[in-house]
Amino acid sequence: MPGPLQGLRVIEMAGLGPAPFAAMLLADQGAEVVRIDRPGAGGALGLDPRFDLSARGRRSLALDLKRPSAAAVLLAMVERADALIEGFRPGVMERLGLGPAPCLARNRKLVYGRMTGWGQTGPLSRRAGHDLNYIALSGALHAMGRDGEPPPVPLNLVGDYGGGALLLAFGLMCALHEARASGRGQVVDAAMCDGAVLLGTLFHGLRAAGEWHGAREANLLDGGAPFYRCYACADGRFLAVGAIEPAFYAELLRGLGLDAAEFAPQGDRARWPAWRERFAAVMATRSRDDWCAAFEGRDACVAPVLDWDEAAAHPHLRSRASHVEIDGIVQSAPAPRFDRTVAATPRPPPRPGADGEAVLRDWGVDAALVAALGREGAN
């Protein structure tokens, strides 16, 4: 596939969540990614594989890695790979004889990417967990939601994808860049708990400056500010307001028909609760789309809260082709954009094991290893 990563060869050990998403990001930008599935595996979360969208853009080889012939085939592929991605608990790849040591012994330039929740080391490293657990430990979850209520479940975007997949993809590219100069690969230990902590960098600075308080809905970016939160409209839909800068705040007040003198100074936190109630009462008098029309052309940082279908149909996102339709399924387009090495529309997700013969041939796996694989019935 075309794209800035054309020529990069990646082996992905099939799994769930952030590791497949990181592999998808690489495949979207032109890397050749081969997904190693278990024989008889289905799509993630029990889905038909065609709906496992984070598996798009790559081919699939099914290997039973508990069999020596299958492990030998994988090691032969490692010799020809630039990177390997795995998202198992610490120790699993080592027990299969496929940990960093044997892989780097076969290919000293290999970048070995490891995606876990708690990391490869530490007291919790071998404990089970999911996105919500990792962001809970990071401090990020505590800062979200309504005052006096339990924190919300913010989808699995902060831990799995922001702090996990994106951190892994960034780490892989850093190590691949370094390997060009040194001729040596290395292990990338990407942990979702580390990533969630990293995403909180701004807030550590605000706390140190005395500008962030422990209570929820008491701060600039957590819904405490009346000019930075979501409001219900007359039709039960919502409007997102983010008028932080004074000029945008002034436009917001004008659009709402409110007297600017009554809502000044903007940073008077003691008055924020009363102002939130007033803003909410005004917002509730008109429908979401009426408000959007009223704010059309105003730099008031006001946007409608759209559902998935509305987002795909929005004129701005349509103009940027932010969504694509692949195999009849509307989904996210590759991002970011490049002006020369433009990424192609990704291929649909593969059926697990569908590309075995072609992958083994294209990766130049020795015929004797392929024959042993067939004799053992390991694929």
Image (cartoon, rainbow, N blue to C red):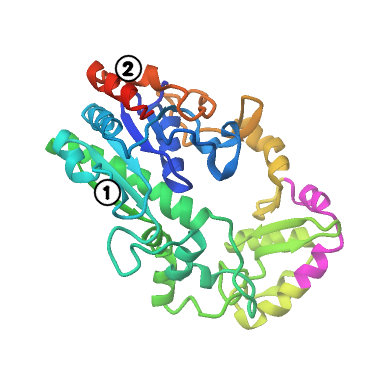
Rendered view: 304 above or below 280: above
Secondary element at tag 2? helix
Rendered view: 47 above or below 345: below
Name the residue tied to disc 1: 95
Number of numbered labels in the structure image: 2
Where is residue 366? Give x, y as percent: 23, 19
Assign the C terminus to one quadrant of the image: top left
Residue range corresponding to the magenta coloring: 278-296
Residue at left offset 41%, top offset 45%: 19
List the single residue furthest toward the bottom.
270
Sooner in the amino-acid sequence: mark 1 or mark 2: 1
Q: CA distance from mark 1 to mark 2?
A: 28 Å
Assign the N terminus to one quadrant of the image: top left
Q: Which amino acid does the dot numbered 1 rest on?
A: Arg
Q: Which amino acid does the dot numbered 2 rest on?
A: Asp
Q: Residues within 10 Å of mark 1 (few under 14, many from 20)?
A: few
18 to the left or right of 361: right
106 to the left or right of 202: left
Residue at left offset 48%, top offset 23%: 344
Determine the main secondary structure of the stretch shown in magenta. Answer: helix
Rendered view: 212 above or below 92: below
Let me know if residue 289 is in the magenta part: yes
Q: Which tag is nearer the camera, tag 1 or tag 2?
A: 1
Where is residue 144? Give x, y as percent: 57, 69
Name the residue tied to disc 2: 362
